[in-house]
Image (cartoon, helix red, strand yellow):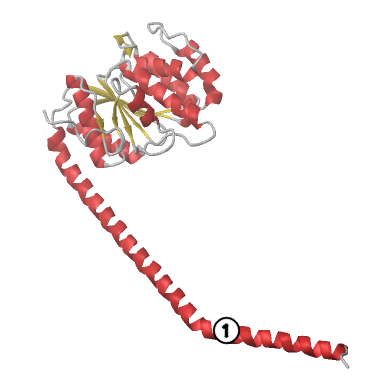
Amino acid sequence: MINFRYHLVSLTAVFLALTVGLILGTAALNGPAMEALETTSQGLRDSNEQLRAQVAQLEDQLGEEQEFAAEIAPAYLSAKLTGKNILVVALPGADTGAVDGAVQMLGYAGATVSGRISVLDDFFDPTNADQLVDLVDTATPATVQTPVTYDGVQAMSYVLAAVTTGKAAGTAVEVAPGDITTVTTALSEMSMLTVETAPTGLADGVLILAGAGATDSDADSRNTGMVTFTNEFAADGPTVYGAMTSTGDGNPLTDLRADSADTVATVDNAAFTQGQIAAVAALAEFINSGTVDHLGIGEGASALLPDAA
């Protein structure tokens, strides 16, 4: 007679058989599976080691190339900008070491740095637009006629360019030392500007150095502001925009190469010694012959250095 005990014993026997089968199956497959897993893991470890070795080799090669570039820079740039006054402007994202390097290259070229300023993030913050408009009303020298615009960045860039280059829309204007101080001090007090070397108000050319552009929620507005800023300086004289890199969504370099290719020279690898040399060489070409170069290794670059004369 089949009773509850019979069912219990039967079920127990079934589960016991399943358990034994799993144990035996696992034991049978465990060896090959573990061997395959270990082989795969070792392959990945070997691949990673190769990649690390390649990266180290490329870093060494880059270091050697930069050392070589630094050695030839004095001879290559010699006398290209003798007697020229150059304003140096750093925008957000510009590496300080790269800016220092570019200043050194200007020295090799015989140029005089007629001012070095850093424009900070708050200058391009869209929430500060009204403050810039108000500042234009109070700080603009009487000799400078500002354009009619509600764009605070554009208006203030126009004024800052005028007092630091001695030109407004390409026309020479009289700028007193006090005019320069009024504008730069006001912007400094608003945490929008720092002054490393006080501008003299004279500039034969402008070297602007910048990062890859903004990436925050206001990135479009900030990056557009940097393009506008650059174009206002370019309206006053030969201007080179040297980006640390050509990468990054919204990088102002991309817009400048697309829309201002005839009025703003560009370099896309200014983070490196080679790019700093190229930026100064491009500025010399622009000032001395009117040639607008686009140099570097990114999209839109035509060469690493200007064509030999």
Judging depth in this view, the residue of 254 and 1 nearest the camera is: 1
SS class of the residue under badge 1?
Answer: helix
Residue placed under numbered mark 1 in the picture? 25
Judging depth in this view, the residue of 3 and 95 nearest the camera is: 3
| Relative image position of residue 150 (x, y in whole percent) | 51, 13
| Relative image position of residue 173 (x, y in whole percent) | 32, 8
Where, quadrant-wise, is the N terminus in this rendering? bottom right
Q: Is residue 122 visible?
A: no
Mark 1, other Cα within 10 Å: few <14 / some 14–19 / many ≥20: few
The residue under the point 30% across, 9% down is 171
Would residue 223 be found to the left or right of residue 66 on screen? right
Which of the 4 image quarters holds residue 262? top left
| Relative image position of residue 170 (x, y in whole percent) | 30, 11
The residue under the point 49% across, 11% down is 137
Q: Is residue 162 above or below residue 58?
A: above
| Relative image position of residue 247 (x, y in whole percent) | 38, 39
Which of the 4 image quarters holds residue 107? top left
Would residue 136 be found to the left or right of residue 262 on screen? right
The residue under the point 87% across, 88% down is 4
Q: Is residue 189 visible?
A: yes
